[in-house]
Amino acid sequence: MKTTLNLNDDLVARAKAVATREKSTLTKIIEEGLVLRLRRKRSRTVSTLPDIPVSSKRGGLRPDIDGTSNRSLFDAADA
């Protein structure tokens, strides 16, 4: 398919340099980039996150640690 794109001049120059260095074409470089982008996007939406292990122990955080505060958690981990 033929199409017209408006691309950043510097980006096209860099892509052409890569194509020349790899003995390829600008079209192939753009196609590869689209394939990678679409594959990454698809795999992110299709995959499921693994179950997070949960401890069966009781007790929770020490009373002086605020579980909703990154700073408090960071300080406790650093101690």
Image (cartoon, rainbow, N blue to C red):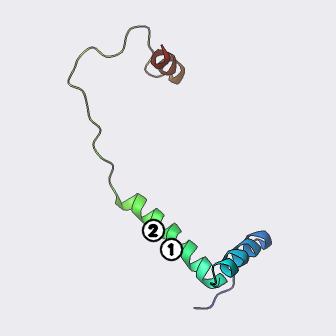
Indicate the position of residue 16 as horizontal and vertical percent values.
72, 78
On the picture, is 6 further left or further right than 73? Answer: right
- Is the residue under label 2 in contact with that under label 1 (CB below 8 Å)? yes
User: 67 or 11: nearer the eye?
Assistant: 11
Q: Residue furthest bottom?
A: 1
- Name the quadrant containing residue 55: top left
Task: Give the quadrant of the N terminus.
Answer: bottom right
Residue type pointed to by label 2: Arg
Indicate the position of residue 30 as horizontal and vertical percent values.
61, 77
Q: Please tell me the numbered disc located at residue 35.
A: 1
Q: Residue at x 44, y 13 (%)?
A: 65
Q: Residues within 10 Å of mark 1 (few under 14, many from 20)?
A: few
Give above or below for 74 relative to 51: above
Give above or below for 24 relative to 65: below
Element on which disc 1 rests:
helix
- Name the quadrant containing residue 14: bottom right
Q: In the rendered image, is residue 27 in sight?
A: yes
Q: Residues within 10 Å of mark 2 (few under 14, many from 20)?
A: few
Q: Residue at x 76, y 75 (%)?
A: 13
On the picture, is 47 further left or further right than 77? Answer: left
Indicate the position of residue 3 as horizontal and vertical percent values.
64, 87
Residue type pointed to by label 1: Val
Element on which disc 2 rests:
helix
Q: Please tell me the numbered disc located at residue 39.
A: 2
Q: CA distance from mark 1 to mark 2?
A: 6 Å
